[in-house]
Amino acid sequence: MPRPTAAQLVYGSATVICTTLALLLLSGTESGIGVGLAAVTALALGLLVAVRLPQPRQTAPARTAHPHPTAARAHPALDGLGARERVPAARSSQHQQADRQHSLRR
């Protein structure tokens, strides 16, 4: 049995409270049987409202395409684990030396 959603709990509870107050105020009853009957009626109506709310749709998570078709074959352990993109390769020492020469900080 699925758990109730937050919307079901809120709408059901609000229905019970509003219905109980309305029935007690409109009927003007002061007997225990009348109050009990109003409470049971409100609970039944609240349950009906909560059950009749539409359930959220459960969709399957969308599979993302790898940026490169060979990426899935290269790392089968990462396929389906949420890896979105590949990590760039480490830069060579020549690129690092060129970056140091052109850097504004010395």
Image (cartoon, rainbow, N blue to C red):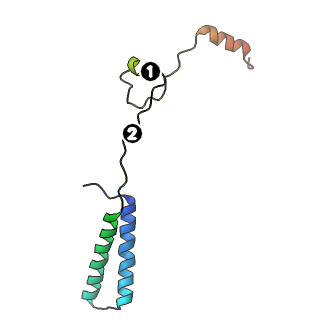
Q: Residue furthest top?
A: 94
Residue at 40% from the left image edge and 17% from the top image edge? 74
Could you say which is closer to the camera, residue 33 or residue 62? 62
Residue at 38% from the left image edge and 88% from the top image edge? 26
On the image, the x and y values in percent for residue 76 come to 36, 21
Residue at 40% from the left image edge and 61% from the top image edge? 7
Residue 69 - label: 1
Residue at 26% from the left image edge and 83% from the top image edge? 37
Residue 23 - label: none
Looking at marks 1 and 2 on the same chain, the residue that comes earlier in the sequence is marked by: 2
With respect to residue 23, does 99 lie above or below? above
**Is the residue under label 2 in contact with that under label 1 (CB below 8 Å)?**
no
Residue 84 placement, left or right of 76: right
On the image, the x and y values in percent for residue 77 come to 36, 23
On the image, the x and y values in percent for residue 20 come to 35, 80
Q: For residue 4, what is the image quadrant?
A: bottom left
Estimate how packed mark 2 is, as few (under 14), some (14 to 19) or many (20 or more) residues with alpha carbons within 10 Å.
few
Instruction: Name the residue carrying label 2.
Output: 61
**Element class at badge 1:** loop
Number of numbered tags placed on the structure image: 2
On the image, the x and y values in percent for residue 18 come to 40, 77
Could you say which is closer to the camera, residue 80 or residue 60? 60
Q: Amino acid at mark 1?
A: Pro
Q: Amino acid at mark 2?
A: Pro
Question: How far apart, in angstroms, are the residues tagged by discs 1 and 2?
Answer: 20 Å
**Element class at badge 2:** loop
With respect to residue 28, does 103 lie above or below? above
Quadrant that contains the N terminus: bottom left
With respect to residue 22, does 29 lie above or below? below
Quadrant that contains the C terminus: top right
